[in-house]
Amino acid sequence: MAVYVGMLRVGRLCARSPGVMGARVGLSRVWQEVGLWGVRPLRVLAPRLQAPGTECKLGSRLGKRTFSLINDRKSASSSGEMDRTATLPVGGLSYVQGHTTLHLINKTVGQCLDATAQRVPDREALVVHHENVRLTFAQLKEEVDKAASGLLSIGLCKGDRLGMWGPNSYAWVLMQLATAQAGIILVSVNPAYQAMEVEYALKKVGCKALVFPRQFKTQHYYNILKQICPEVEKAQPGDLKSQRLPDLTTVISVDAPLPGTLLLDEVVAAGSQEQNLARLRHTQQLLSCHDPINIQFTSGTTGSPKGATLSHYNIVNNSNMIGERLRLHQKPPDTSRVVLPNPLYHCLGSVGGTMVSLMHGVTLILSSPVFDGKKALEAISRERGSLLYGTPTMFVDILNQPDFSSYDISAMCGGVIGGSPASPELIRAIINKLNMKELVDEEVDQRREQPPGQLGHLVVVQVEVGELGQVVEGAGAQHADVVVGQVQVDELLEAAEGARGHLADLAVLQVQRHEVRHGPK
């Protein structure tokens, strides 16, 4: 049974317990339809989707990391809370959407960058200390426009795929925003991928261009590419013809001239020409906020990595809501400075980091090319970082730095932890030692706060196996089986909110604007 999730927020959908965020329910209860016209019990699963007598037991495999498409009317009404789940049956399939009072934004990433640069042009936007980069929002927009124009000038078009393969860097952020500005789909490639993995990823999504540095530590990117694409050494830049990668025509080197490649600085320089900027302005008029704009690969733990496809609409609203969760709108804008040690190829880095900064006009600080606990502390101390992102293992490393007490962390006030469950002991240590009084845990998608003087007062969501909560605000979810046509007991497939689907994988399922692909392209 697959559950396809609609839009918003980087965190996983939260299973909510009574008195905290919503109703707790048993799984054998019937589905309910909740809308503007009230609540009524309804089996929204079409007969062909559910076998007679089948009990719908979602979540028995995933425990607390699940969500529900059902609500307990009695519990919701008795608690006095509004039931926030509204079902929208489409084509005989169950589809629900969480209620939200936030205004959803119908803008592209480029439009949001333009608006922020106009609103706070002189505010610091990006700091990359290891590359000596420091840009305001006005400067960042200017560079992004030139890079976007340059990409169009070398033959890339709206809808083409460009892979970014490398560690955290200014070039990574530049390509993320420039591709969005030009309508090109950014493919986030794991910087640790080796030849076979890179070949699989580029073939899977049909990458037309690939951007990478020459080398980082022991990872020789150009040499790895030559293993699967030996033609690059003798190719004319921008006119690559590869037997194993037939879609790949353009290879761009970030930091060194290499045979068969274009240099990124040259591409950006070409974008400053007026005729190319005019082409960019024309292309932007053709963009929709519902266009796909980013492909992120799953980890591959349950099979080959799948390309989850995200749209402008998803990324913009996702990042806007993360900022709301972090209460950035309640903090002095000039004091909000996000320190990001997480990889940009992951959603928490590119959406929770880059896009939150862009949407809310706060400074993004890349602490190091790859995670380094000491470098993260140095960035916090040197740049007066106020928010820190990380996984539990990252936070453990930061807290256990031998010279931890020598760093100035007085500006810290909160951040995000996610990627895997964090123990209460670790949460307390983060709050107390790192002064992060407001901590958003994306594993349960619930803010955990430590008000001054209330040691250990954590808001923790506990969900038992076999019980579920409800769809979070602004999210949509669909309950369906696109393979066998009926509900499979004990199976739950969880997807990131807003993913348009897994690119080039099995059948096509359309629900309003949401398209989910499974199977051959």
Image: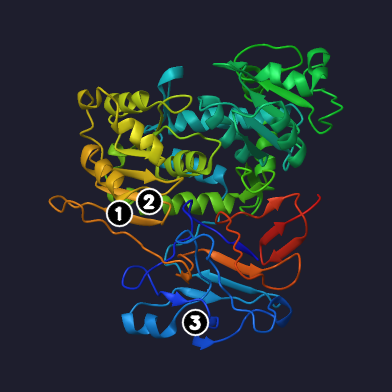
Does residue 20 sit above or below 55 in this rendering? above
Tag 1–tag 2 contact (CB < 8 Å): yes
Asked if residue 241 shows in the view, the reply is yes
Tag 2–tag 3 contact (CB < 8 Å): no
Residue most extreme to the left: 453
* Residue 47 position in % (x across, y down): 71, 82
Tag 3–tag 1 contact (CB < 8 Å): no
What is the C-alpha distance between the residues marked 1 and 2? 7 Å
Q: Amino acid at mark 2?
A: Asp
Of mark 1 and mark 2, the one earlier in the sequence is 2
Q: Residue at x 34, y 73 (%)?
A: 18
Asked if residue 167 lies left or right of residue 135, the reply is right
- Residue 431 is marked as none
Q: Residue at x 27, y 30 (%)?
A: 384
- Mark 3, residue position: 36
What is the C-alpha distance between the residues marked 2 and 3? 31 Å
- Mark 2, residue position: 441
How crowded pointer 1 is (Cα within 10 Å; few <14, some 14-19, many 20+) is rated as: many
**Mark in the foreground, 3 or 1:** 1
In what element is the residue under mark 2?
strand
- Mark 1, residue position: 448
Q: Amino acid at mark 3?
A: Leu
Q: Nearer the viewer, residue 21 or 425?
A: 425
How crowded pointer 3 is (Cα within 10 Å; few <14, some 14-19, many 20+) is rated as: few
Q: Nearer the viewer, residue 250 or 117?
A: 250
How crowded pointer 2 is (Cα within 10 Å; few <14, some 14-19, many 20+) is rated as: many
Where on the picture, by quarter, is residue 509?
A: bottom right
In what element is the residue under mark 1?
strand
